[in-house]
Amino acid sequence: MDEIGLRGLVAAGAVLLGSVLQGSLGFGFALVAAPVLIFLNPDWVPGALFVSGWPFVALMTWRERKHLSLQSEFSPWVGLLAGLVMGLLVLRVVEPSRLGMIVASVILLAVVLSVLGGRIPLNPWSRLFGGALAGFMGATASIPGPALALLHQEASPVQMRAVLAPYFFLGSTLALAGLWATGQLSSDTVRMGLLLIPASLSGFIISSRTARWVQPALLRPAVYLFSGMAALSLLARSILS
């Protein structure tokens, strides 16, 4: 197998694993897939990640639609749009490594405070800020999930999936449009993303079964672990870049 074929196979494995994780817990796709794709080819992130994940998050949003509350989603959606626009604009003038350090520090601080017993009040303003931070993280670091996962850490697995799925769908759609409009979406990136779609769809199919195994008691530790790993990964990536 040539080098290109091997890299594609490894990338497909990461996307498959990330899809199973997110389809089961509600988050985790970018945490697993983004570092692997960056290692294989930095040009694949974030474009190929969003292209390969778009059909997955669309199907997941449809699967969890019965548990979706549009009223609770409105504030983070507004924040999402603002955060995405700000992230895309800031990317053009600020080095990604500096942004990564700031965002990673904010997430790590939130994780530490949560572990120590602090709780973020769940209201329209916190949802708005969480959505904006997640949108900003998605545009600048390809890891949008930790902000909203921490915000909804006391939700049940079903509620977590229902809250985050439409957010990721809207975020992926707007991010792809923004990357295209700003000339940051190359044909090679799109081609790689399309090749990875079967892996993400396979992960969706598998997660339809594994989602039933997720116990509520395990969700909050999973949120802390996911958010902490995402922040450390982003911090390491920023320092080494």
Image: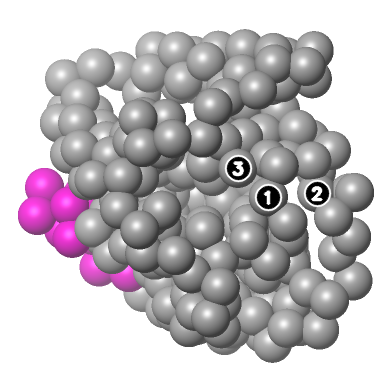
Residue topped by disc 1: 155
Give the quadrant of residue 15: bottom right
Q: Which image quarter is the N terminus in?
A: bottom right
Disc 1 element: loop
Q: Is residue 45 left or right of residue 162?
A: left
- Whether residues under marks 1 and 3 lie with C-beta atoms below 8 angstroms apart, the answer is yes
Residue topped by disc 2: 219
Q: Is residue 55 left or right of residue 11?
A: left
Residue closest to the eye, 162 or 123: 123
- Whether residues under marks 2 and 1 lie with C-beta atoms below 8 angstroms apart, the answer is yes
Disc 2 element: helix
Residue occupying image coordinates x 43% and y 77%: 58
Residue 142 appears in view: yes
Q: Main secondary structure of the magenta part?
A: helix
Does residue 50 sit above or below 235 in this rendering?
below
Dot label at residue 41: none
> In the image, which residues are magenta?
177-190
